[in-house]
Image (cartoon, rainbow, N blue to C red):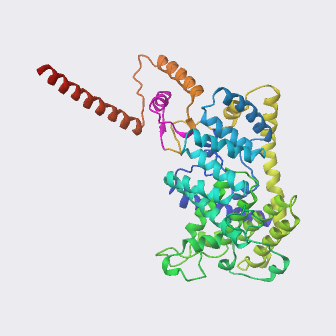
Amino acid sequence: MRINRIINKFVFVFCVNVCFNVWFLYPFFASASLWDNETSQLNAVPYQTVMQVLVGNHLKHSQNYHFWRISMYEDAWNKNPDSLILYDAIAVSYHLTGRTNDAIRLMLAKERKKAGEYSTYANLATFYIADRELYKARFYAQKLLNKYSPLALRDKYQVYWIDYLIECAARKGATKKQRRKITLPVQGDFTVDDLADSRQMYEIPNFYSFLARKFRSKKDRNKKNILLTEKQTDEAIFAMLQLLRFSHSENIILIEAIGDLLLGKTVLPTLEEGQVTYKKEQLENQKAAAQVAAFAYLRAAQLISKYSSKAEKSYTFLASSALLHHQNYLKKEDRYNTEDILVFLAQKIKERDNYLKPIFEQEKKWIEEGLRLDTEFESNYLPELENYSDSTFFIKTDTIASQLLYILNDKIPDYLVVDSLQKATYLAAFMAEEEAQKNKDNKVIVSRIDTQTSIKVGITALISLSLAIILFVRFRKE
């Protein structure tokens, strides 16, 4: 099909562009979405295309897994109530099985037990968005950004996105004291009558135009025709895809926001400083942006169809508008309608089902065989993270020995939050490793944080010794 060629070409150019412009600028991406004991490893599992993320075609668990994990981890938590990592795992499974209120209560209990954990703020922001409590979501998203500002990309755009949701809710008449019910589409109803209007990007009240207004400079404060630069657009798309990848894959309001940003790529962006003409890649990148934006809107329409026929029609009309008004730069024979995109959407969903069905069936089989699903899933599907720098705290974890030092110094990376159960496990593993390495010259690599701690302890010991000597001499003279 022709649409395959055009969209796949766009995806290739877009992904290469984003990887070079974003990935190397932001080497660590801590999830400002759902965060549990597997997130660090799942962060290392790549995905290939925008459409894969939009339809949920990536490594994840079945509902059976989450019901199993709730049962097993609740038992473990009752025996080890100081286990912070169990709080995260149980809360994420609560949320993904429809028990968001229970997930919120559990995360608040964890915050009371140990305040300021990255995963606590990340999960609470996500849970409160799902519960339509936007100001509470904004509060925890901002705390996350303030405390862990080096990890700003995904976290930063989550704050922008929540601000956009609050603005749209206020535009629809909600007040701060009211529960912020998010109606769909977030940008407002879109009817067949609106199809006749060919609006400029800055005139559409969507997430793209919200970001353009937010990023405009002081000298452009009074301008209305503001566009994002290419770098800003690509950064925003990449960050929002990451949010979708690590939240619920059927998150309609996130999918709509991604569609808004993709629609923004149908207009040639503001030239970067010093750039006088558009590159070939930029022109190629524009060619299928309308089709991929329509893909996102139709995916949203598909997901909302079982709940609201009105919202389904609005998303379908948004897709039609993208194709009607944003393919002017293409030849007539290269333009597509919603039926073409729906065929492609069905194809991508079939690919997703073919990928996930064996994984879900395998998890069901492990349950029937009485095996531990978390252990089996990790060994069969998750990558090994050797010399992994944890994206939450940038602490290098090289060996079991260095992990023990973190335990002793209370410097634990978030994905290794250690409680009484884990402490015994790590200590036993460390002793076994130490025994195996006797008479060998292997060095234990310790992070910079451990070295600083050792220096502080050494200086404190020297000061204490000096004071003891002075006191000893003084009392002896007396």
Q: Is residue 375 above or below residue 323?
A: above
Left or right placement of residue 212 versus residue 319 in this view: left
The answer to whether residue 218 is visible is yes
Please name the residue shown 71% across and 32% down the image: 74
Quarter of the image for residue 40 reads: top right
> For the point 54% across and 20% down, which residue is it?
428
Measured as percent of width and height from the top left, residue 351 is found at 79, 51
Magenta segment boundaries in residue numbering = 394-414
Q: What residue is shown at x 63% (from left), y 71% (from top)? A: 210
Q: Is residue 42 left or right of residue 101?
A: left
Q: Between residues 9 and 328, which one lies in front from this camera angle?
A: 328
Identity of the residue drawn at 81% across and 25% down: 369
Res. 345 image quadrant: bottom right
Left or right of 380, for residue 319: right
Q: Quadrant of the N terminus?
A: bottom right
Q: Is residue 363 left or right of residue 478?
A: right
Considering only vertical position in the picture, is 111 above or below 189?
above
> Relative to the observer, which residue lies in front, 270 or 371?
371
Which quadrant, please, contains the C terminus? Answer: top left
Visible residue check, residue 9: no
Residue 157 is one of the magenta-drawn residues:
no
